[in-house]
Image: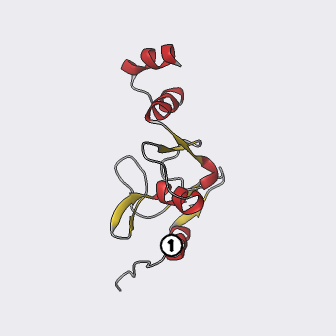
Amino acid sequence: MKQVRPRTIDGYREKLNQLSVSSSNGCVEFSGQRNKKGYGKIKFFRRDVRAHRLAYELKFGPIPEGLYVLHRCDNPPCINVNHLFLGTARANAVDRMLKGRGNNQYTVVLTKEV
């Protein structure tokens, strides 16, 4: 059976709800396709987008240019909007480093400037 693509914003909200699973830690994990790093990916009006970015935009509106959607929970498939926040590339790098996923060559530079 062929999957029907949503045609409205509400249709995409429903699709995200259908493709999500709540976990005991408060995360709502996207159960559809994921990329190599574990981030959910979904077609949005024929464009591939990350599921957490779509969830954020559906709740709060467009993401300003140059900003990232970061996870408080550090769980890439999580689309719980209460776990998501906006940040710059620098904030993303600092967040990554503080959570122990930073590339050691940048740790010294980031901690000196913060």
The answer to whether 28 appears left or right of 63 in the picture is: right
Figure disc tally: 1
Residue farthest toward the front in the current orientation of the protein: 65
Q: Position of residue 21 (x, y in %)?
A: 57, 63
* Residue 75 higher or lower than 1, as above or below: above
Q: Quadrant of the N terminus?
A: bottom left
- Residue 102 figure quarter: top left
Q: Secondary structure at mark 1?
A: helix
Residue 78 percent coordinates (x, y): 53, 53
Placement of 30 over or under 1, stated as above or below: above
Badge 1 amino acid:
Ile
Residue 60 left/right relative to 108 = right
What scheme was used to colour the molecule? secondary structure
Instruction: Answer with left or right where residue 26 lies relative to residue 43.
Output: right
Residue that appears at 54% across and 63% down: 58
The residue at 39%/57% (across/down) is: 34
Q: Circle 1 is placed at which residue position?
A: 9
Q: What is the x, y in percent for residue 72?
A: 59, 41
Residue at 48% x, 63% y is: 31
Q: Position of residue 42 (x, y in %)?
A: 40, 64
Q: Compared with residue 67, is residue 18 higher up or lower down, i.e. above or below? A: below
Residue shown at 59% from the left, 61% from the top: 59
Residue 69 position (above or below residue 55): above
